[in-house]
Image (cartoon, rainbow, N blue to C red):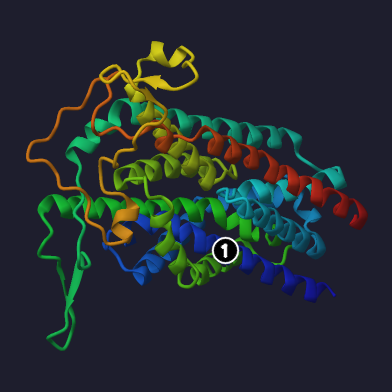
Amino acid sequence: MVSLLTVAGIVVAVFVGFNIGGSSTGVAFGPAVGSRLVRKATAGALFVGFGFLGAWTVGRNVIATMSSSIVPAAQFTPTASVAVLFFTGVSLLISNLYGVPASTSMTAVGAIVGLGLASDTLNRALMFVIVSAWIVAPLVCFTIGIVVGRYLYPHLDRYVAFTTFDLHFIQLDRSGVIPRPYLNPNASPQDIVGSLSVVAIACYMAFSAGASNAANAVAPLVGEGGALTVDQGVLLAVGAFGLGSFTIARRTLETVGDDITELPILASLIVSIVGGTVITILSYLGIPASLAVSTTSTIIGLGWGRASRAATLAELATPAPEGPELDVATGALVTSRVEEAPAGPTIGDIARHEEPAEEPEEIPDVPDIGVEGPADLDERSLFDPKAAKRIVTMWVVTPSLAVAASYPVFAILL
């Protein structure tokens, strides 16, 4: 029975890692694949390589926390390990059904907390630190997003441009016996620097994903008396990531651009840098945290910051009057605003092979804060309060659901 449970635990761990690899590859390399800088197979290989690097180095700290610090390692019996992984998967499924970026780390920790409460072995001091990090990290990402979006983004967007390539950035000359790679002849020096930056940041995101997510797949199976050693756990997790990266990630890489049509490449790079850095720091400290939560918080903050440029701080603090607005020029009542196109090419444009709007011959000045400029998007298209509220609510509900579902089961089994 024990051997069968161990096999079942490994199978469930592979399934969790498979889904993590499929979703995380699309998040990390969506801009790079959409802009034809790398192919899907190359994206999968890079994700596995840098994910392994993150899991083998920084990720060990998170594995140690989740496998032996939240509850003693002895509590992870084969039955308990399978149950923890099962409740993690179910909670993530519910979150995904609601269309909310799922927090694998938070749901996995929630299932372990249920085990700790049922066995009265929960390290409450450590959980206080972890929950505090779960609150502070999104707020930090949200704040950085606001500052960048409101004060820095228009200036960055003024000078940073990305070319949409009809052919891939790196071509292969197959005329000889050995294929010889060469750069796309349409690429300018600025394109080369920008393209390398996009790929480098994607690899950095893969590193962060490996550091934070390896523990979510294998932590219950690792530890004293566990089915796997830490090294074996890392290899199993990264192998499962690879299965997802080379299979279901292909679909994710295709659809991520269409789903985020108003997120320009520049914005996606900012989000990747901020979210990835926060998660890498927390992973180094051994704190399990969610890459999805950090990146989504940055997206919300960046969108709100960009949308708020049309108003001063005093105007933002003043409640807006309800009802239709009066157009001063015509005297007509305006019930809605016309949404304008994003300033830079979006992931959706590139994924659908659409050319962005032609750049003006002269770079326009960045409008002052409090003055609406032609490059600004409609506020509702950049920041949707209802969507943000739904996302934050599910971030609280999902780990709570994992605790509530796992606790009675462990109370009966133990």
**Image location (x, y in percent) of residue 59:** 53, 52
Q: In terms of depth relative to the viewer, which is nearer, 380 or 5?
A: 380
Q: Amino acid at mark 1?
A: Asn
Name the residue carrying label 1.
19
Residue 34: which quarter of the image? Answer: bottom left
Q: Quadrant of the C terminus?
A: bottom right
| Mark 1: secondary structure | helix
- 56 relative to 145 in the view: left or right: right
* Residue 206 visible to an observer of this rendering: no
Residue 97: which quarter of the image? Answer: bottom right
- For the point 18% across and 84% down, the residue is 178
- 141 relative to 373 in the view: left or right: right
Q: Residue furthest left?
A: 361
**Image location (x, y in percent) of residue 121:** 82, 43
**Image location (x, y in percent) of residue 345:** 26, 48
- For the point 59% across and 42% down, the residue is 287
